Amino acid sequence: MTTLDTHNDESRKPLWARYKYGHHWRSADEEFDACKLGFWLFLTTEVLLFSGIFCAYFIFRTKFPDAWAEGSRLLDWKIGCLNTIVLLVSSYTMAMSIYCMQTDQQRRARLNLLATFIMGGLFVVIKLLFEYVPKWSGWFLFFDPALSHYSDNIAHGKTMLGGLFRYVEGYGGKRPGQFFDYPFASSPNVPMWWSVYYCGTAIHAAHVLIGMTLIARVWWRARKLHYGPTHYTMVEMTGLYWHLVDLVWIFLFPLLYLIH
Amino acid sequence: MASHAAHHDAHHEGSYLTPKGGFLTTVIDWATTVDHKKIGVMYLFAILFMFFIGGLAAIALRTELLEPVRTAVDGTITGQLFAPSDQKSITAGNEIYNRLFTLHGAIMVFMVIVPSVPASLANFLLPILLGAKDVAFPRLNLLSWYVYVVGSMFAVGSIILGGVDTGWTFYTPYSSSWTGNEMGRTVLMVLGAFILGFSSILTGLNFVVTVHKLRAPGMGWFDMPLFVWSIYAAAIIQVLATPVIGITLLLLAFERMFKIGIFDPALGGDPVLFQHFFWFYSHPVVYVMILPGFAIVSELISVHSHKKIFGYRAIAYSSLGIALVSFIVWGHHMFASMSEMASTVFSGLTFLVAIPTAVKVFNWIMTLYKASISLNTPMLYGLMVLFLFTIGGLTGLPLATLSTDLHLHDSYFVVAHFHYVMMGGTIIALVGGLHHWWPKMFGRMYNEPMAMLCGVIVFIGFNVTFFTQFFMGSQGMPRRYASYVDEFQVYHVISTIGSYLLLLGFLGHFFVLAWSLAAGRKAPQNPWGGLTLEWYTSSPPPEHNFHHEPILKHGPYDFDTTVPPGWDPRDYPVPADAKTAASH
């Protein structure tokens, strides 16, 4: 009976307390440190990846200042600002979820993860519905604040999905490259601006989606108590990744939306 | 001591090569293994296979160049494979030639030389040399192997669909201009190189963390073998340079798929920007190719001279020095695309590279001085690298000098230069390292006289092939042309004969090594008398590398004070006047 009891004690422990580190490490701490070092190196490669986009941005900005001025004026800083706030708050909830894991507040940790996930989704939705879709097609959501600027050009008869979307004449067509049919561009190099804009924001958005996938996985495993005070490696790494995604946006936002 | 070391294989734990069960079980075991030794072996065979394909392309190129007018690659098997469906005119034939040299370059750079030593030999050896059971992230290691396979499949797929004619550098507007049905193939090839980059990043990242965190108890930074130092320096470059080619190739793929203008001048983009991005990666990556070669040479020279390596710290620091300098010299690939001021600055910086590399070469030569050299295949290859790489390095100097480069750039002089460096440095070192560690990896001895013979054939073939090209280039033969003026024919014929000799030599090596697996003598624990930690374990090593966790008691090159581990005088005779510690 006693042997059975010890066995039961071991299996009654939550998964995080039963975690076994890799056989080639001498302790769990060493493994955690190595993971952290490796992940920081990985983040360095991510920064270098984005540096290519930033480099292209600055070179073409110097070469075609007119196109850059015109292009950035066509972005609505309010939408960009809203998305910045969304990401900043999500970084806070991400950090909170790590803290809660370290202090074994499983429920709060999961709630914070969920909140981070939802805000990541919100970021992508705002990007799509208020930026990409109107710029490609000219269709605006009926409550889009930008509509007030184009009140003269709203095609009143043209609505979609029962009035959810309204059409603005001559606004769409701001797509990259061969799809560019924006009628009143004053500088021939404005398509270049949109190329850099879409490459930068799309690669960033892809990173947001990858980050959301990681968060979803961590949340799923957290439900089964995989993480706790002595083992929270994946939560911390996901957090680091999410902060990087946030940081890249912090640089993209002023460069694209604020300086003309 | 000798009696203790003589027959050490009291443990019958089985090696990492021992099959786990039937055929299917063994295949699944290898396909899902996280053992760095198995992954290294899988990488080795994949890389050797790609080396064979790339080599065949080179032979096809050399065969085509036998005649001043285009002949061989039109209508033959390669011609059928690569011919555009519509026409077979002179231009179509040149097109085939362009695709062939692109195929050769892209395969040799992205699929052979960059991963060659780090992913295969270093993957196998690095943890063992550090006294660890595995690399820091074993599953990531397996992932990087699969990423390599997927990336190679993209590239091979592009080749099967008809190949790319941009050259391995994918310069815009060659790579961004649209010529009919060619589009899908270029995107495939570019994405293949992009994916291969991730494999390289993952391996480099793994190695950096392994060196930082998994050294054996008692092993400080300056107790590490020089092999580890060089691999470490190369891994840092892999991590810091490869993402830049990642974003460059991604933008290039976007450019082709969505016709956005970043690099294509027709769309307002800047082709020089592409060149800057490309070489910001591809110059440092030249040192990802050569530093692992240096890693091997340091070991070969010291172990087979039975003498402490000269200037340990200088060699170690020079590896880091090379890594540092590698990031600030990329402009010398594009002197023609920059202002005079920028060209001058890059020319000056380029000369800096010569300093740390010369430090290495001088130290190796000093190691050989008054040493008792065992002249076997690994040592032969070590000496070959010294000879060939020095020629390659010295011919780099006229290319770094603006006034001479004006005449030599894009000529066969450049082709010869980088083959002496890349092939004479890395591939030759890889073959030497392969023979040096073959007994450790597979537990079999190869046939020494036969391997020596093949080595001599390779050496002669190499020089006949590429030394001729220095003459051709300095007389004005431009690279990347299928046809040429008659005056150059004699050089081209000599060069082609040399390439056939090279093929013969490498095939010979292949058969010697394959034969050793089938019928070679069982390898002793320490066939060369090395002192680094891999010689403390059995040949081939057990699953967890060591029977007991090794504790470091001496430096990696203390031949004068330490009896080699597992030394049996019957296994290898130490030369009479060797300054090695006598057994007692």
Image (cartoon, coloured by chain):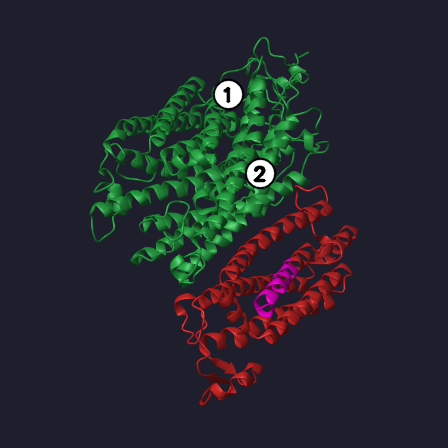
Reading the chain from its start, which is encountered first: label 2 or label 1?
2
Residue B85 in the image, given as x and y percentages of width and height: 23, 52
Compared with A31, B312 (above or below) is above
Identify the hue of chain A: red
Disc 2 residue type (three-letter): Val
Q: How many labels, in total?
A: 2
Q: Which residue is mark 2?
A: B325
Residue positioned 74% across, 54% down in the render? A17
* Quarter-of-image position of residue A204: bottom right
- Where's residue B208, x and y in %? 62, 41
Q: Quadrant of residue A50?
A: bottom right
The part of the chain drawn in magenta is A241-260
Q: Nearer the viewer, mark 2 or mark 1?
A: 2
- Which three-letter amino acid code belongs to the residue tagged 1? Met
Q: Colour of chain B?
A: green
* Nearer to the camera, A60 or A220: A60
Residue at 52% across, 23% down: B523
Q: Is residue B445 visible?
A: no
Q: Residues within 10 Å of mark 1 (few under 14, many from 20)?
A: many
SS at mark 2 in the image: helix
Chain at numbered mark 1: B
Q: Is residue B187 left or right of residue A28?
A: left
Q: Secondary structure at mark 1?
A: helix
Q: Which residue is mark 1?
A: B379
Q: Can residue A177 be found in the magenta stretch?
A: no
- Farthest top residue in view: B576
> Where is residue A237 drawn, in percent x and y?
66, 56
